[in-house]
Amino acid sequence: MLTMYKWFFMSFFFSGLFSFFSKKKHLLSTLFSLEFMVLSVFFYMFVFLIFNYYDLYFLIYFLTFSVCEGALGLSILVSMIRSHGSDYFIMFNMLQC
């Protein structure tokens, strides 16, 4: 039963990874795909910990760090939009930053 869930959530993870590598036009779409990958890892860990009767305290720490990572990504996105005008990767010049 656990192997079925493992393949199910890993397919979600790899679909998020595929969208991360294929959507290179906008920064927001790459942030969405990263958050999708974090959620798939979270659900996989949840199912793993439930089936093995472990404590779920680690999931609270994982969610805390993933929320902080998402807030940091959005703040960087807002600052880049304010400084460059859009979230296209073509607009960014690394020599300017």
Image (cartoon, grey):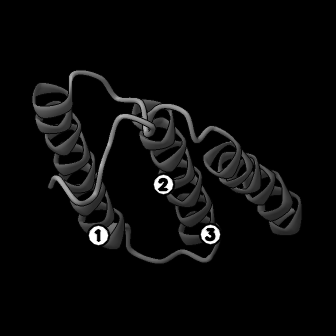
Q: Earlier in the sequence, mark 3 or mark 2?
A: 2
Q: Mark 2 — residue?
A: 38
Q: Nearer the viewer, residue 66 or 33?
A: 33
Quadrant occupied by the C terminus: bottom left
Residue in the image at 37% along x and 67% along y: 56
Residue in the image at 54% along x and 74% along y: 53
Amino acid identity at mark 1 = Tyr
Residue in the image at 29% along x and 23% along y: 86
* CA gap, disc 3 and disc 2: 15 Å
Q: Earlier in the sequence, mark 1 or mark 2?
A: 2
Amino acid identity at mark 2 = Val
- Compared across the picture, whether 90 is left or right of 68 comes to right
Q: Is residue 37 above or below residue 82?
A: below
Quadrant occupied by the N terminus: bottom right
Q: Mark 1 — residue?
A: 57
Q: Position of residue 10 (x, y in %)?
A: 76, 60
- Compared across the picture, whether 2 is left or right of 22 comes to right
- Compared across the picture, whether 76 is left or right of 16 comes to left
Question: In this rendering, which labeled residue sits more in front, label 1 or label 2?
Answer: 2
Q: Position of residue 35 (x, y in %)?
A: 45, 45
Q: Mark 3 — residue?
A: 48
Q: Is residue 59 above or below residue 32?
A: below
Residue 58, by quadrant, is bottom left
Q: Residues within 10 Å of mark 2 (few under 14, many from 20)?
A: many
* CA gap, disc 1 and disc 2: 17 Å
Q: Residues within 10 Å of mark 1 (few under 14, many from 20)?
A: few
